[in-house]
């Protein structure tokens, strides 16, 4: 196990080993089972970052549930409004469903806010949020995030699905930037 990795111009060191991650994923899975076991929830995993968390989480859910994947695509608006994020890939009818958004990390929360707006317009019965990581100090949006595996300081991290410029998603541990 390499404790230090280099990705492009940055060095990172292990901050959360896989075993510690999986302990918290276990706990979140138990909380979801406690709350949603009889609701046939539809999990909506937000690609790309949450693919590893989603896999480990789903393996730990011993009740009827469904899984689908969405992606937030940035596109340049035709007006001067700049970059807008659009939700793509949602093929399920979520009307009346119990939906659980599965995210890798909530930082400012603006991405999550955008996603909630889009999904709410489709009239699900309820929407819950499950995130692997939360950076509480950066949170700007007023969000009710019920399921959080880990709260972390305001440092940039990679690994376990999260990337730096497309790289680093493949590491099983979470690494924090050193310099
Ligand atoms: P937010 O809209 O500020 O909450 O940003 C959320 C998105 O930013 C996440 O889905 C990630 O793609 C990305 N992000 C935020 N912090 C980090 C980090 O520390 N490492 C890698 N990606 C991050
Ligand atoms: Mg993400």
Image (cartoon, helix red, strand yellow):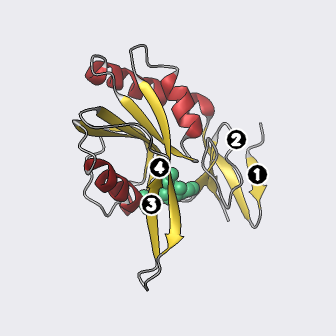
For the N terminus, the image quarter is: top right
Mark in the foreground, 3 or 4: 3
Quadrant of residue 137 within the rendered picture: bottom left
Report the residue marked by disc 3: 86
Measure the alpha-carbon separation of dots 4 and 2. 16 Å
Place of residue 45 in the rendered image (x, y in percent of width and height, measured from the top left): 48, 40
Mark 2, residues whose alpha carbon is within 10 Å: few (<14), some, or many (≥20)?
A: some
Q: Which mark, by number, is residue 107?
A: none
Q: Indicate the secondary structure of the residue bearing disc 2.
A: loop
Left or right, 59 with reference to 124: right
Determine whether the beta carbon of the residue marked 4 sits less than 8 angstroms from the nearest atom of ligand 1.
Answer: yes
Residue at which label 2 appears = 171
Name, please, the residue furthest toward the top: 62
Q: CA distance from mark 2 to mark 1?
A: 10 Å
Q: Earlier in the sequence, mark 3 or mark 2?
A: 3
Q: CA distance from mark 3 to mark 2?
A: 28 Å
Q: Residue at x 23, y 43 (%)?
A: 123
Discs 3, 4 touching: Cβ within 8 Å: no
Q: Which residue is mark 4?
A: 105
Q: Mark 2 against mark 1, which lies toward the viewer?
A: 2
């Amino acid at each position: 196990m390499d404790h230090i990795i280099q990705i492009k111009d940055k060095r990172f060191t292990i901050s959360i080993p896989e075993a510690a991650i999986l302990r918290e994923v276990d706990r979140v899975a138990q909380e979801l089972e406690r709350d949603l076991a009889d609701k046939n929830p539809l999990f909506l995993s937000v690609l790309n970052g949450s693919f590893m968390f989603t896999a480990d989480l789903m393996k730990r859910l011993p009740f009827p549930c469904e899984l689908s994947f969405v992606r937030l695509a940035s596109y340049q608006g035709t007006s001067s409004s700049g970059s807008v994020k659009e939700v793509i890939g949602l093929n399920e009818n979520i009307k009346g469903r119990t939906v659980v958004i599965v995210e890798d990390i909530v930082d400012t929360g603006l991405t999550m806010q955008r996603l909630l707006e889009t999904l709410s317009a489709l009239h699900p019965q309820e929407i819950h949020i499950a995130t692997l990581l939360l950076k509480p100090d950066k949170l700007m949006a007023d969000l009710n995030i019920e399921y959080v595996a880990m709260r972390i300081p305001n440092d940039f991290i990679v690994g376990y699905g999260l990337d730096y410029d497309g790289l680093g998603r493949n590491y099983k541990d979470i690494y924090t930037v050193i310099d």
